[in-house]
Amino acid sequence: MTDRPLHTLGAIEALRAFRTRQLSPVELFDALTERIERLDQADPEGCGPINAVVQTLGDGRSAARSAERRYLDGVDEPLGAGGSALLGLPVATKEKHGIAGQPLSQGLSALRDELAKDDHPVIARVRAAGGVVHARTASPEFSCATVTHSPLWGVTRNPWNRRLSPGGSSGGAGAALAAGYAPLATASDIAGSTRIPAAFNGVVGYKAPYGRVPGMPPLSADWYRGDGPMARSVADTALLYNVLSGVHPGDHGTVPGEGAVPIDYPDAADWLAGRRIALSVQLGDYPVNPDAQAAIQRMAAVLGAAGADVVQVELPWTSAGIRDLTMAHFGHILGPAMAELTSGMDGLADYTRRFIVDAAAAAERMSLIDTLAGESRLQAELAAAMGGADVLIAPVNAVDGLVADASYLDGITVAGPDGGDLHLTHYWQAHLTVPFNVNNRCPVLSVPIGFGANRLPVGMQIVGHPYAESTVFRAGAAVEALQPWPLLAPVG
């Protein structure tokens, strides 16, 4: 047994403790499942439980016991490699990542009794690397909102401030990590669904280049989307990502990469010397909350003091233009798929109904070929802004938080550039993430960089050139080294 509370251990720390026999995988499994049972539905503040976990999997204990026996026999593979890459580590998985024989509802009440026929590729890879799936996490219906609540699962709340949302759609994953329910979690991202909750929960989330992590056909062919890792540190995120990524025979959109990203970052901040970092606080005209603006400007100054050349760049983007373009994209692919599946269903969430209607209307206004032309334009504009830079940094969220049980059907009011209120017609305009789903071959890492006045963490996106994955991880490790952040919310 280690001297640290077991729920505070990171993934790589736990792997090392397993190998030295200071910790058993069974001890960690039991500690984390007990923590979930004790805390996830508790309501000490009277404003609702965290409610991040929709299912615990007790049969994972037998996998933990098997891992324990393997460690007793000796593990010869390098740390983080091969069939022992995640050996014995509890992993919380997003419910949409189906497990054969287990419920697969995607938050829809009408599908509560549907069972997955096969493991999602993400689940299969976690298990092949020795990972133990012990908990499944909440998302909004169809993962189509930036808040996490549904008629089936109720409201998921942020462990840092329970009146506010953990974000979405991977809100349960972000909240589970921040609450100490798991060292690793799986997520997905089609418009920011990994990065938004990573930022609001003070954890790390990674949107990989399209095709690097296999998905489930047919919607895996949507080039905005991707599955990926979340964790409480850059190295742990890299550890899980290396397991998830790579060509898969069931997803012909998958592509090989540059090789494994590093999981060890000695002298991480030294990487910054002589690097050129492009800074865009608003990505055009996004009305970014003053706390987020101040946090990223402080971080830019820290990076500059460490030897980086930080240069402010301008992008000719508008949040309204990006809203129209991306909603039309969804109106040609995701929206029709959702409409077909939910036809005749009662009890859909209000945001689901609204998404289907809005996406269809946007597709009527903009043809698929016009969306492709618009995407090409945004990609060229980002390439020009990043010319000569190693990475670009920008906020994740334009707002400091979202009300936990709100749906924002009438848009969202944010702080305007003149200090007054500004009303945005669609709440997706409150996040600076979807432009990088359009720029879909660019790797993007979300890392914490501070706190807002409402006690919620503030996140920063680190954007790389297409497929330059190691670069964003090295930049993230440098940020982590220069400005360490609290790894857990003050829960339990």
Image: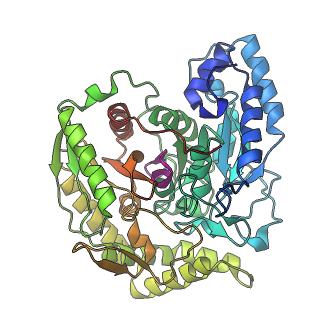
Residue 393 visible, this orientation: no
Range of the magenta residues?
198-211
Q: Position of residue 203 (x, y in %)?
A: 49, 45
Q: Is residue 218 magenta?
A: no
Residue closest to the eye, 49 or 96? 49
Q: Residue furthest front?
A: 45
Q: Quadrant of the C terminus?
A: top right
Q: On screen, 142 above or below 198?
A: below
Q: Quadrant of residue 324?
A: bottom left
Q: Quadrant of the N terminus?
A: top right
Q: Position of residue 285 (x, y in %)?
A: 25, 70
Q: Relative to residue 66, is residue 322 drawn left or right?
A: left
Q: On screen, 143 above or below 469?
A: below
Residue 183 visible, this orientation: yes
Please report the residue visible at 61 percent of the width from the left and 45 percent of the height from the top: 491
Q: How is the image coloured?
A: rainbow
Q: Relative to residue 424, is residue 96 drawn left or right?
A: right
Residue closest to the eye, 7 or 303? 7
Residue closest to the eye, 287 or 278? 287
Please report the residue visible at 58 percent of the width from the left and 52 percent of the height from the top: 159
* Marker count (numbered): 0
Q: Quadrant of residue 382?
A: bottom left
Please report the residue visible at 75 percent of the width from the left and 13 percent of the height from the top: 72
